Amino acid sequence: MSPLIQNIIRFAVIMAIQVLLLNTVELQNVTAVWGVSLFKPFFYLLFILMLPSNLSKAATMIICFITGYVMDKFTMATSVSSPPGLHETACVLIGFMRPFILGLFFQHHTKEMNKPITPSLSKMGFKNFFIYIFIIVSIFICYYYIVEFWSFKFTDILKMLLKIVSCLFTTLILIILSQVLFVDAGRQNRRR
């Protein structure tokens, strides 16, 4: 299957999980602390994290903009809690930062292999993959909640910090869990 088709399918599946499942899950009564829901993962960032490493910066930023635009449209339809364009700008920011961060982890791999590498747990190893996603997701979530905080509710910095930490934790757990499940499934399919 061509990389373009793989990425289109990956985009559709990840966005469907985010929009149809994770955005509609209401766990505020169960996981709320000081009125802050502790379950708000941004699982769709996995699509951006797994873009091929050889994409140009312009192509990466365009794809990130489109991804953020789609999320903004679905978020605006279901809630009014974030300012318009917040997902777009946060996605473009990590699209801009991603090549620099990938350079830290993939520089030796791209020189050895003359083909695009898709960053994943199986190709990077747990430590490098975790550091990579931690940096990218942290940048996204900090930007997202700081802009949201100053746009609507400049009342309680502690709530904003709690949102950042809880969202970062749940997003990282879901991304790593999805990688472990897909890596194990891929290894079992190759053995057959």
Image (tube, grey):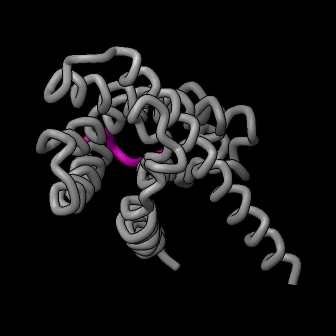
Q: Nearer the viewer, residue 32 or 128?
A: 32
Residue closest to the far bottom: 192
Q: Is residue 55 magenta?
A: yes
Quadrant occupied by the C terminus: bottom right
User: What secondary structure prevails in the magenta region?
Assistant: loop
Q: Is residue 4 magenta?
A: no
* Left or right side of 48 for 108: right
Number of numbered tags placed on the structure image: 0
Residue closest to the far right: 191
Name above or below for residue 39 compared with residue 16: above
Q: Nearer the viewer, residue 52 or 73?
A: 73
Q: Nearer the viewer, residue 15 or 66?
A: 15
* Left or right side of 4 for 178: right
* Left or right side of 2 for 169: right
Residue at (69% x, 48% y) in the render? 121
Name above or below for residue 130 compared with residue 64: above
Q: Nearer the viewer, residue 65 or 145?
A: 145
Residue 120, percent from left and from top: 63, 50
Asked if residue 86 shows in the view, the reply is: yes
Residue at (47% x, 33% y) in the render? 136
The image quadrant that residue 78 belongs to is bottom left
Residue 122, percent from left and from top: 73, 52
Asked if residue 4 shows in the view, the reply is: no
Residue 53, percent from left and from top: 49, 45
Residues rendered magenta in the picture: 52-58
Residue at (31% x, 29% y) in the render? 145
Residue 179, percent from left and from top: 66, 56
Residue at (83% x, 75% y) in the render? 188
